[in-house]
Amino acid sequence: MTDVQYSVYILRCADDTYYTGIAADVKRRVSEHEDSPRGAKYLKGRGPLTLVYSSVIGDRSAASRIEYRIKRLSRSRKQALIDGRSSLPELVPDQGSVAG
């Protein structure tokens, strides 16, 4: 078993939409989205991308659950998270332990 720590992140696209994902290395993953065929299809042609939020969650399973819940938030609630007006535990209840 590995101790890889996964993070959830939110990117703002040039068309002012948000993309939420998870990664063990957020910086590398954002670079893949921008410069690699391994990037998400949704992001093709939507650059430049800006990392607007990132939080270390823990294991991949927990990060995937948090990602799913963030994707279901309204744009205004995502914006509150990004701006720091709301915290992840406030917006994503019953998430378990969040490191960060």
Image (spheres, rainbow, N blue to C red):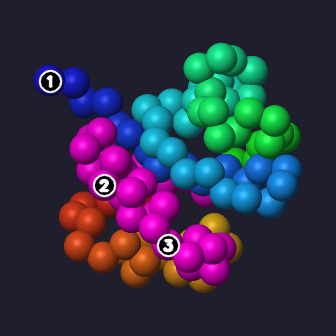
For the residues labelled 2 and 3, the Cα–Cα distance comes to 13 Å
The residue where tag 2 is placed is 65
For the residues labelled 1 and 2, the Cα–Cα distance comes to 20 Å
Q: Which mark is residue 1?
A: 1
Inspect the image, locate mark 1, and give the three-letter code of the amino acid beneath it.
Met
Quadrant location of residue 3? top left
> Do callouts 1 and 2 mark residues in contact (Cβ within 8 Å)?
no
- The residue nearer to you, when weighing 67 against 45, is 45
Q: What are the residue bounds of the magenta stretch?
A: 53-79
Q: Nearer the viewer, mark 1 or mark 3?
A: 3
Tell me the element at label 2: helix
Q: Which mark is residue 58?
A: none
Q: Residue furthest top?
A: 37
Query: Of helix, strand and loop, which mostly describes the magenta segment?
Result: helix
> Do callouts 1 and 3 mark residues in contact (Cβ within 8 Å)?
no
> Is 57 left or right of 13, judged from the image as shown?
left
Inspect the image, locate mark 2, and give the three-letter code of the amino acid beneath it.
Arg
Q: Which mark is residue 73?
A: 3
Q: Quadrant of the C terminus?
A: bottom left
User: Going from the N terminus, do you reach mark 1 or mark 2 first?
Assistant: 1
Circle 3 residues within 10 Å: few <14, some 14–19, many ≥20: few
Q: Quadrant of the N terminus?
A: top left
Q: Nearer the viewer, mark 1 or mark 2?
A: 2
> Is 14 left or right of 65, judged from the image as shown?
right
Tell me the element at label 1: loop
